[in-house]
Image (cartoon, rainbow, N blue to C red):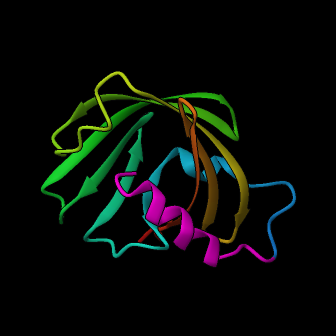
Amino acid sequence: MILLGVSQVKAQRFELKKPDNPAKCASIKEGRFVRVDYPAGIWNMTIKDNVQTEYFNNGKEYIKSSLVFLNDCSYKAIVIEKTAQNDRIKVGDVFSNIITKTQDNYLQIQTRIGNSQIELIYAKAKSK
């Protein structure tokens, strides 16, 4: 979420052309995720036990958030800890997220904090 403007433009190039109906939102509740617009070394995320950890800089920095699910497709991410040197995101910030589409292992998510809103596409890594 560090490079919000850049990721929004790039994410729009990758489209979910045949989305699931209804969306399979439960897949966000656990697993490892990458962004379709970043190499995994630059950004990747894990979710387990309602804790989301975003890793940056080859895992040297992170932002950890507690997840509160409002329903299967909507959740809030509350920043609880961070080492990432990003002054825009602070402990206590609340991101509101809505999964708008899914297709195969992809999830399109609308993220909002304050008056800012972006769309991101995550790919869920296959389980081994």
In the displayed structure, 109 sits above or below 114; it is below
**Furthest residue toward right:** 21
Residue 11 position by quadrant? bottom right
Question: Residue 115, image x and y in percent?
Answer: 57, 33
* Left or right of residue 128, residue 101 in this image: right
**Residue at the spot 22% in from the left edge and 47% down from the top edge:** 62
In the displayed structure, 86 sits above or below 40; it is above
**Furthest residue toward left:** 60
**Residue at the spot 37% in from the left edge and 58% down from the top edge:** 3
Q: Which of 28 and 64 lies nearest the eye of the viewer?
A: 64
* Left or right of residue 29, residue 34 in this image: left
| 32 inside magenta stretch | no
| 4 inside magenta stretch | yes
Q: Which of 33 and 90 lies nearest the eye of the viewer?
A: 90
Residue 21 position by quadrant? bottom right
* Left or right of residue 19, residue 119 in this image: left
Find the magenta span and give its range. Answer: 1-17
State which quarter of the image contains the C terminus. Answer: bottom left
**Residue at the spot 18% in from the left edge and 63% down from the top edge:** 57
Question: Residue 64, image x and y in percent?
Answer: 30, 37
**Residue at the spot 53% in from the left edge and 73% down from the top edge:** 10
Question: Residue 98, image x and y in percent?
Answer: 66, 42
* Left or right of residue 106, residue 73 in this image: right
